[in-house]
Image (cartoon, grey):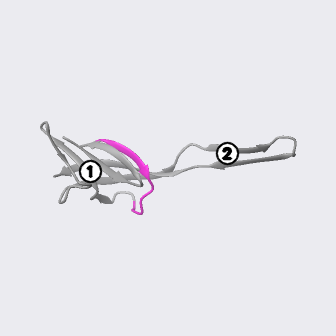
Amino acid sequence: MYALIETGGKQYRVEKDSVLFIEKLNAQEGDTVTFDKVLLVNKDGETKVGAPIINGAKVVAKVVKHGKAKKVTVFKFKAKKNYKRTRGHRQPFTKVVIESIEA
């Protein structure tokens, strides 16, 4: 059984006990979060597609930890103008484990 959920402007294919790194959520470590935007559910070969979401379907996950991804270097340069700027960015994420899919 698997489902497609939407969170943080992205879509993810999830199964029970799968681990996801998603956009940072406002939840403490150890809390459970519920994803209500379920776009598709496949159970025993039967596929249910929402228009755009499936009413009553939800995915329950447990927050494992929060963190930051590896640094991305942003470098700006203009030729012959003596202009150089270096910036770095680390995107925050939340690591979750899917506990159940209820359709």
Above or below for 4 versus 35: above
Tell me: 45 left or right of 8. left
Magenta span includes 5: no
Front-most of residues 19 and 37: 37
Q: Which residue is drawn at 39% across and 57% down?
A: 29
In the image, 85 versus 24, the foreground residue is 85
Q: Position of residue 31 (x, y in %)?
A: 33, 60
| Residue at the front extreme, as displayed | 51
Locate residue 87, reporting x and y percent: 70, 49
Whole-number angstrom distance, CA of label 2 to CA of label 1: 35 Å
Closest to the observer: 8 or 90? 8
Of callouts 2 and 1, the N-terminal one: 1
Please provide percent x and percent y for residue 70.
56, 42
Magenta range: 18-28
Among all residues in the image, which is located at the extreme top?
45
Q: What kind of residue is marked 1?
A: Leu
Which residue is depicted at the point 71% across and 44% down?
A: 75
Which residue is located at x 36 percent, y 49 percent? 96
On the image, numbered disc 2 is attached to which residue?
74
The quadrant where residue 34 appears = bottom left
Q: Which amino acid does label 2 sit on?
A: Val
Q: Identify the disc placed on residue 39.
A: 1
Is 21 contained in the magenta span? yes
Q: Using the image, tell me which numbered label, if any, was put on residue 96.
A: none
Location of residue 26 (image quadrant): bottom left
**Disc 1 on helix, strand or loop?**
strand
Which quarter shows the N terminus?
top left
Instruction: Identify the residue shown where x is 42% and y is 52%.
Output: 65
